[in-house]
Image (spheres, rainbow, N blue to C red):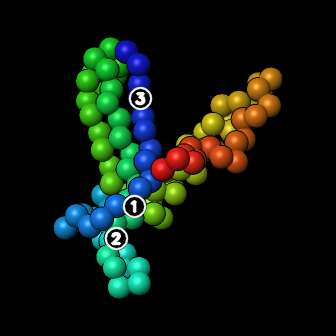
Amino acid sequence: MGVIIKIIKKTVDTVVGRVCDVCEQSLYVDVDGQTIEECGELRAKLGFGSKQDGQCYQIDLFESCFMVAFYTLRDKRKTEFMFSDKNDFFDENFGLKLDC
Ligand SMILES: [Zn+2]
C-alpha cells in the first residue's frame, strides 16, 4: 500500500534518441566535444492498495523540467509542515544525494 516516488538526477554515457518527456528536448549535451546524457527521472511504482492500483510511472526529464518538478515538491513539503512544530521543513539539501 506504500507509495514510493524516487527522483534521480544522473549523468551517464550516451543512449541514442532519448528526449525529455515534457518538452521533447534532447537529453544529450555536448561537453568539451563529448556527448553526455543529462537526465532527471521521476519514477513511481505504486502498490495494489493505492488509488493507482499497481501502476508504474517513469518520466524522463531535461534539467529545466526536472527542476520544475523538484521545486514543486520542495514547495509542497514546505506547505505540509508550515504550521507544524517541525521546524526543519525547509531543507536546503532536499533531495540532494551526496554519494552519486
Ligand atoms: Zn523538458
Q: Residues within 10 Å of mark 1 (few under 14, many from 20)?
A: some
Q: What is the three-letter code of the residue carrying label 2?
A: Ile
Dot 2 beta carbon under 8 Å from ligand 1: no
* Marker count (numbered): 3
The disc placed on residue 4 is 3
Q: Secondary structure at mark 2?
A: strand
Give the residue at x 66% y 31%.
80
Q: Residue furthest bottom?
A: 33
Give the residue at x 41% y 25%.
3
Q: What is the three-letter code of the residue carrying label 3?
A: Ile
Q: Residues within 10 Å of mark 3 (few under 14, many from 20)?
A: few
In the figure, residue 5 lies in which quadrant? top left
The disc placed on residue 36 is 2
For disc 1, the marked residue is 11
The disc placed on residue 64 is none
Residue 41 visible in the shown view: yes
Mark 1 to mark 3: distance in Å?
A: 22 Å
Note whether 38 is above or below 90 in the view shown: below
